[in-house]
Image (tube, helix red, strand yellow):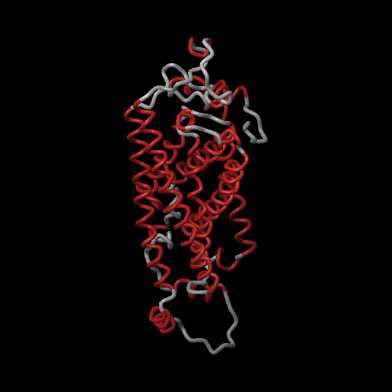
């Protein structure tokens, strides 16, 4: 499937990045560098312009009462919500619409390429590029942990430009199916809806999507990618374009001419690359199980009757006749009980965990 991105590669930009692509062994980067930069600029626009405008319009009292640091964190969550919703929709469309991807065999899943899959990878890389810039610019807020996450995520998705396991870029980005619900949960806390029915129903959807997409779907595909990479580390690709084997009419699927066109005689999966990718994947899977346990505990605490009683005791009484003001709303939000969990994303004003 060809790259469906509406803007074609920009020749001058592709030419400018070509030496870096050659040096880093990323042959498909010149074809998609414009997507990486455009989407990074788009998320910056959402962060700087769209998020403040929409938030001031929809939640004027709550948003204006926030400090500069809190507003930055709020805006980051808006970007995270937009990104996760958009990338999920596009990835699901590519998964079902890309026939070449459907028919890929084991070596294509490691060395193969389609324009549509690479677009998803480029859009993800663009988001993590923006994430890296925001995190590095606000280290006093996000800290070293979030910086390390941003760098790691950008590096992992950049490996796809070799190309390397492009097939799985759409697979693992679907971990983000739980992220919209995670962001909604965070906003419920900020808007004084902690313990509400809206947060309850959203929490159930969050747990369901997190369990099915990350623990079931994610673990299954982690096993598949482990098997594919392990096999590739022991063998060379059977199809290498423009070699004597091709000239001798080596019997291979006709789609190889498209999906395997970036394979060369030097194509391989070095030990460092396989170990790095699989190690990162194993770490993230382990964190998913840990986060899932913490997530259930956090939801239980929010709807525990004893916790609700304690919250009611701490809440200032009202005679029911006073009008609501910005100061009262701010006091109400601050009086809510806070718990440092993955669902909060609040300690240190950190954004929600990504993929």
- Residue 67 spot, x, y in % from top left: 48, 61
Q: Residue furthest right?
A: 6
Front-lying residue, 73 or 284: 284
Query: Residue 25, relative to residue 52: is it above or below?
Result: above
The residue located at (41%, 38%) in the rendering is 225
Regarding residue 48, the answer to whether it shows in the image is: no
Left or right of residue 352: residue 143: left
In the rendered view, does 281 fall on the left or right side of 217? left
Most extreme residue toward the bottom is 319
Q: Quadrant of the N terminus?
A: top right
Q: Residue 270 at what x, y percent from top left?
A: 35, 26
The residue located at (50%, 29%) in the rendering is 112
Dividing the picture into quarters, in which one does residue 35 lie?
A: top right
Residue that lies at the very extreme toward the front in this rendered image:
251
Task: Give the number of marks.
Answer: 0
Q: x and y percent of residue 82 in the render?
A: 57, 51
- Which of the 4 image quarters holds residue 279? top left
Q: Position of residue 144 (x, y in %)?
A: 35, 47
- Residue 254 visible here: yes
Q: Which residue does the image show at 60% across and 44% down from the upper left?
A: 90
Q: Is residue 266 left or right of residue 76?
A: left
Compared with residue 103, is residue 341 higher up or lower down, i.e. above or below? Answer: below
At horizontal 52% and vertical 41% (from top left) the residue drawn is 170
């Amino acid at each position: 499937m060809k790259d469906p991105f509406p803007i074609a590669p920009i020749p001058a930009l592709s030419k400018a990045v070509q030496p870096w692509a050659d040096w880093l062994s990323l042959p498909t980067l010149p074809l998609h560098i414009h997507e990486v930069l455009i989407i990074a600029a788009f998320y910056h626009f959402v962060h700087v312009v769209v998020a403040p405008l929409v938030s001031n319009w929809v939640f004027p009292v709550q948003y204006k009462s926030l400090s500069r640091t809190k507003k930055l964190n709020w805006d980051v969550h808006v970007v995270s919500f937009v990104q996760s919703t958009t990338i999920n929709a596009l990835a699901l469309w590519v998964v079902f619409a890309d026939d070449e991807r459907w028919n890929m065999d084991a070596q294509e899943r490691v060395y193969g390429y389609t324009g549509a899959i690479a677009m998803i990878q480029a859009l993800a890389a663009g988001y993590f590029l923006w994430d890296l810039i925001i995190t590095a610019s606000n280290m006093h807020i996000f800290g070293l942990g979030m910086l390390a996450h941003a760098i790691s995520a950008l590096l992992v998705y950049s490996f796809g430009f070799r190309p390397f396991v492009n097939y799985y870029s759409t697979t693992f980005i679907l971990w983000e199916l739980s992220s919209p619900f995670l962001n909604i949960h965070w906003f419920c806390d900020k808007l004084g809806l902690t313990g509400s029915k809206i947060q309850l129903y959203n929490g159930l959807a969050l747990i369901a999507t997190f369990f099915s997409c990350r623990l079931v779907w994610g673990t299954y595909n982690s096993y598949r990618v482990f098997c594919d990479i392990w096999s590739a580390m022991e063998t060379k690709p059977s199809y290498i374009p423009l070699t004597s084997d091709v000239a001798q009419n080596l019997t291979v699927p006709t789609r190889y001419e498209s999906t395997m066109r970036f394979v060369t005689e030097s194509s391989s999966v070095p030990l460092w690359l396989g170990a790095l990718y699989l190690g990162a994947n194993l770490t993230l899977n382990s964190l998913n199980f840990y986060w899932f346990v913490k997530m259930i505990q956090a939801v239980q605490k929010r709807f525990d009757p004893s916790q609700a009683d304690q919250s009611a005791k701490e809440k200032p009484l009202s005679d029911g006749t006073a009008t609501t003001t910005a100061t009262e709303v701010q006091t109400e939000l601050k009086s809510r009980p806070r718990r440092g969990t993955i669902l909060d994303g609040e300690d240190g004003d950190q954004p929600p965990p990504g993929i």
